[in-house]
Image: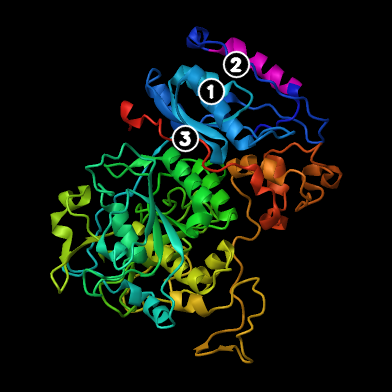
Amino acid sequence: MRRRLFGISCALAVLALALGPAAPPARAQLPAPPPVIVPAPPPAIVPALPVSIADKIDPALLELMQANPLAQLPVIVEMQEPLPPFIGAPNVNRALEALDLLRVYGIPVAALSLIDAAAGFANAAGIDALSLVPTVAFIHHDATVGPQPSAAPPVPPATPDQVSGVYPRVVRADKVWQQGIAGGGVTVAILDSGVAADADLVQPDNRILASVNFADQRLTSDPRDPGGHGTHIAGIVAGNGTRSGGEFIGIAPQANVVDVRVLGNTGSGRISSVVRGIEWVLAHRAAYNIRVINLSFGAPARLPYRLDPMSAAVEIAWRRGLVVVAASGNGGPQRDTVETPGIDPYVITVGATDDRGTLGRGDDMLAWFSAWGSADSNAKPDLVAPGRRIVSLRVPGSALDTLFPDRVVVAQNGSTYFRLTGTSMATAVVSGAAALLLAGRPNLTPNQVKALLVGTTQPYGEDSGQVLPDPIADGSGLLNVYAATIAVPCDAAPDPGLLPGGFLVGMLFSPTPVPCANRGLRPADGFARALYPVLFGSPLQWNDPLFGGIFWSLLTWDTLVWNSVAWDNFAWDSVAWDSVAWDSIAWDSVAWDSIAWDAFTLD
């Protein structure tokens, strides 16, 4: 898709005039757009190119517009980057501008300052009008997100009575516990349907540090998790087995969690709710020592990751020091079925195995439902973890508990738990593993955590007879958290505890660092736009000094057109992210209390 190259105001005016006469009659009934003042920038070396208005509208949204032009459709209006001089919090200003545009052309719902956007509703005529506003970069379909159901297996790979409470030992988390590391002090943000106050999370100490809701109106009579999915995920990450007498334990049983509810009572939500939840996590990461975000859900990937708003959001979180773990989805065994945000190359994307309820890994299989491959040709998932018939916490009376009473599991002491299947469960296993890593080595960066987890996996399935559909279908292999905790991370400073020969007290590991992760990647467009005020003024380094026949070394921030051509050539790995001007961005600054999702029929 050809992207707009902004920077020459006369080109924008000509474009608007050229498209005006072709507007449908419905536009004539709309109020005139608010005046848009675009300061004329200095002459740029990169020429501006014409762009089709259709290029600014999500193809999935175009289909819905054509099917029902009068319907109020859920949208996210993403703005162009602000122009210098930057006043106040430019991301908030841009988000509020988007909200004002929705007041004119649709129905506003909430600002999304994380990605310089706003969410709301608009019909076909309104969306067309929004696309004509020069400061609007892209109009997304605010699609439904949630745990995706899997197709029935062609041949059930296990007998119905097999359940997995052994998954911590399958991924060797128990050996990490023996080193005195169980996730203490590290907090995992569970973005899901809520987290109920189960004894395995609140006894002997309450490890649910906070609970917020961006999904719907939470009634006081409701449990914290009316769906039941989020609590199950939290138990896989951090359940300590209090109710079961230690029979069913999560991966990091001393880790803390924060409950960020982004899925409603039916188990589904909106992309905008997820973005808002991530923004809250960024704003409160220091207060609760949040180091990991768990996203055990997804939405069909209709756009490349570069155009995807959830990809932009998770990349911003990643650059701020948060490890983001996302599910690949349950759309397998076909290829190119990974969901967003799992399609994003930066995050840790997790597929699922079936551990057959046994400790041995030789009979394990890649789960038939585990999605793999992406249209962007990113090798996804990054690794796999147990995800079939996983036993974890139950929320009595929740939606899942009511729908699937046959999935209740009774512990030896009579307490009840619940079993679920999906890459959602596997994702929680890896989030718990990341918490263990960070508890032992708190200075690890997200890139180092990914490198350690992906670079130390273990083989499996040698006795199962299974032939994978493709070598990339299970990423680098099955999670081995013990090996990850004792491996040397990429870009690590010399470890003073490392003795000659590669020995660390009580442990043996290879002194060769694992391969680095996330090198040479190009971020999503929304990330690049949102981070423009943060990066402005920093050293400009380019991958190719003559890329596209342009003398990039002659460019300065005053002459640079910040668009897809520049983003392709910008040396993103050269940025010192710890020292950029993050203070220019205001997190969690726009009130969410006024959301009115319940007033509309959501698809």
Query: Of marks 3 and 2, which one's residue comes earlier in the chain?
Result: 2
Residue nearer the viewer, 29 or 232? 232
The secondary element bearing badge 3 is classed as loop
Residue wearing tag 3: 591
* Closer-to-camera residue (559/15): 559
Q: Nearer the viewer, mark 1 or mark 3?
A: 3
Q: Which amino acid, by three-letter code, is at mark 2?
A: Pro
Q: How many marks?
A: 3
Range shown magenta: 10-23
| Distance from Cα at disc 3 to Cα at disc 2 | 24 Å
> Horizontal placement of 70 versus 492: left or right?
left
Q: Is residue 520 magenta?
A: no
Q: Look at mark 1 in the image and give the residue it sits on.
A: 100
Q: Quadrant of the N terminus?
A: top right
User: Considering only vertical position in the picture, is 61 above or below 252?
Assistant: above
Residue 80, above or below 489: above
Residue 362 x, y percent position in the rendering = 33, 79
Considering depth in this image, is 568 or 584 the residue closer to the camera?
Answer: 584
Residue 189, image quadrant: bottom left
Residue 266 position, x and y percent, is: 27, 42
Mark 3 belongs to which amino acid?
Answer: Ala
**Disc 1 and disc 3 in contact, CB within 8 angstroms:** no
The disc placed on residue 334 is none
CA distance separating discs 1 and 3? 15 Å
